[in-house]
Image (tube, grey):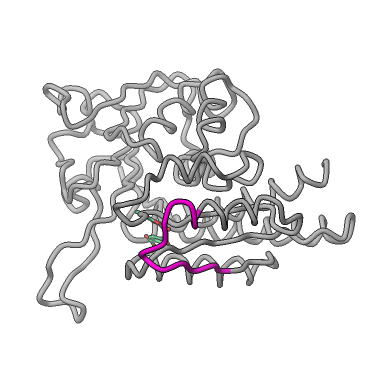
Amino acid sequence: VTTRVIDGKKISADIRAEIAADIQRLKSATGIIPGLAVVLVGEDPASRIYVRNKNRAARELGINSEQFSLPATASEAEIIGLVDKLNRNGEVHGILVQSPLPDHIDESRINMAILPEKDVDGTHPLNLGRILTGGEGLRPCTPLGIQELLKRSGVRIEGSHVVVVGRSNLVGKPIAAMLAQKAADADATVTLCHSRTRDLASHTRSADILIAAIGKPALIGADMVKEGAVVIDVGINRVPDPASPKGYRVVGDVSYDEVAPKCAAITPVPGGVGPMTVTMLFYNTVRAARMAAGR
Ligand code: BQF
């Protein structure tokens, strides 16, 4: 049996082409161009790169994307002031406040300030709640990207045992709820594991689909994965690597080289879930613009 490497970059490029076509259709039909506001607070180097890349990729697709930068010293009130202004701007359909925010800012308060219909990161409690009730909200980008990767790779989710490791509000909890939902591309039996799970391996070994979103390099070893499982690696971890020009390399939460030979399919890091996360931001932005146009 040969392992399939799930090519997130390729699937992501396919979806971006579909999104670009959707944008052109929306524009011809209504004159509306999807608008995205990307808010950066502070100087975190990784955040600056993420924001720059998202802004550039959005423009390439035909989204009207604009970056707003506030200093690291900005108060919660100043950030919410900017969000309010963007909430009232009819040309802005999506608002993204780049995470992580400086320590003195309560991220949940910022998430709540964004109008739920402009919440393209899917972090507003109303949108998170709608996942539980099966409603039509905007969903967080990484979970959406994972679901889309599985769907487009022909992985059958219905009736399968999905084990999620990691319980963050942005990835673990929402993907667990989405895949447990009574819906197409869902209907899984879901186990949600975390840092306090007793005998983690006993759970992960029974997974048909294993989703690792913990943020610890190589936490998932071969002994933790069932033969023939599908493995989705959400981790983005920097590990020191003197042999690399940058002095580090990026690895996932899965020990790729030892796990890959055992499984039916696996996502690489980089080039797996990461590109999908960014693509689903654009998907959500176009969806928000379409909803604003009443279509
Ligand atoms: C790839 C993110 C943690 C915290 C805040 C492509 C991205 C990453 C990897 C990317 C991420 C992760 C983003 C790859 C955006 C995903 O080829 O593997 C793209 O740009 N991401 C973010 O904006 O904030 C984060 C992870």
Front residue (pair 89, 207): 89
Quadrant for ligand 1 reads: bottom left
The residue at 21%/27% (across/down) is: 205
Confirm whether the magenta stretch covers residue 241: no
Tell me where residue 239 sits by quadrant.
bottom left
Q: Position of residue 229 (x, y in %)?
A: 31, 34
Front residue (pair 17, 3): 17
Q: Quadrant of the C terminus?
A: top right
Confirm whether the magenta stretch covers residue 68: yes
Q: Is residue 260 left or right of residue 201?
A: right
The residue at 41%/68% (across/down) is: 71
Tell me where residue 113 sits by quadrant.
top right
Q: Position of residue 241 (x, y in %)?
A: 12, 70
Q: Is residue 272 above or below residue 198?
A: below
Q: Position of residue 86 (x, y in %)?
A: 64, 56
**Furthest residue to the bottom?**
245
Q: Quadrant of the N terminus?
A: top left
Q: In this picture, which residue range is highlighted in magenta?
A: 67-79
What is the tally of numbered marks visible in this picture? 0
The residue at 60%/61% (across/down) is: 37
Tell me where residue 59 sits by quadrant.
bottom right
Front residue (pair 272, 291): 291
**Furthest residue to the right?**
29
Q: Position of residue 214 (x, y in %)?
A: 25, 41
